Image (tube, rainbow, N blue to C red):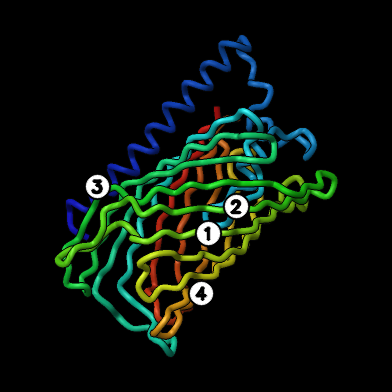
Amino acid sequence: MHQTETTRVRAAAASILLGCAMFVAAQEEHALQKDDGALPENSSLLLGAASGAGRTRAVVHCEHSKLNTQDADPLGAGAWQLQFNFAYSRSTRQWDSSGQNQPRGRAYEWNNQGVLTYGVSDDLDLGIGLGYAGLGDNDSGLKSVQGVSDVAASGKWRFLENEGAGVAFAFVPTLTIPTGKAAMEDRLGVSQEYWSLDTRFAAVKDWSNRWSANADIGYVAAFGERGDYRGSVSANAAVGYRLLPWVQPEAELNYSHDLIHTDPHADLIAVTLGAAMPLSDRVCARVGVQHGIVGRNTDQTTTTLISVDMNF
């Protein structure tokens, strides 16, 4: 990785973490002043002694929220959330059509994204996201690029919930609008350059006060000038265990199948390991790494992920 690229990646990650730390400190100071030295009633520090029925929505969001697997928890009527996502992917190997792993030229991609979400009702969220991204690929022969990425408009509708059984199901659609920097003859582009609609169903299950599980399955339909790409099917499953009141290690299995019109289809199975951390009753942070383990006609990529939710 070039020095300038490394500097940008580190600066972006540091800015996210610094901003979150300042926000958490301000919120905790306000809570302490309000309660005259007492912990906030809904503080995540009390989570270790709380029962499943006594947990607040903010803490439940952090327990169910995973790095790459959708949850089925809307924010609640009138609630707002500002989410910051940072991802850095790097690849120096790829799988061919027979599944053999081979070396390739270095390819990388990083993305900073902000997502603003509003709770329209207790069971419905609407959100809008925009990011700034960069990528390069030594095998392409094209110049690397960075710029504003595509707009993503999303929703989450929880259509079924059984609190007694600790189960919830939701429909989570995401419309990607190609507003980002497009590719040119001599350089890459950060936009996918076509419209797409991800129609996804998600489920969560609480097995106990400490164990939680998520699963989702969806299909991405592509529209317009999409080349040979004809969409993709993907599924994810995750499990998390609340080890301490402030940390929940989690593991995920991720699968995707890309449909290509004239070439063989692409498949990928990856594993994600990370942790969710309820820093306060309003802030949840997640960090982790995803690594491809089996594939066909795709790159073997390692991705570092950082995500922070701020609820207000």
Q: Quick one: 124 or 133, which is closer to the camera?
A: 124
Binning the other alpha carbons within 10 Å of mark 2 as few (below 14), some (14 to 19) or many (20 upward) gives many
**Foreground: 43 or 142?**
142
Q: Earlier in the sequence, mark 3 or mark 4?
A: 3
Q: From mark 2 to mark 4, how far is it between C-alphas?
A: 19 Å
Quarter of the picture holding the N terminus: bottom left
Q: Residue furthest bottom?
A: 98
Between residue 54 and residue 133, name the one nearer to us. Answer: 133
Rendering coords of residue 299 (x, y %): 37, 74
Q: Earlier in the sequence, mark 1 or mark 4?
A: 1
Determine the residue positioned at 35% across, 78% down. 94
Bin the neighbour count of mark 3 within 10 Å (Cα to Cα): few under 14, some 14-19, many 20 and up. few
**Numbered badge on residue 140:** none
Task: Return the residue at label 2.
Answer: 172
Mark closer to the observer (1, 4): 1
Is label 1 in a helix, a strand or a loop?
Answer: strand
Report the residue at 24% width, 47% height from top.
8
Instruction: Indicate the position of residue 2 as horizontal and vertical percent values.
Output: 18, 58
Q: Nearer the viewer, mark 3 or mark 2?
A: 2
Q: Name the residue that disc number 4 marks.
A: 257
Report the residue marked by disc 1.
198
Residue under label 3, please give it.
8
Q: CA distance from mark 3 to mark 2?
A: 32 Å
Q: Amino acid at mark 2?
A: Val
Label 1–label 3 contact, CB within 8 A: no
Q: Nearer the viewer, mark 2 or mark 4?
A: 2
Question: Residue 197, percent across and down?
Answer: 50, 58
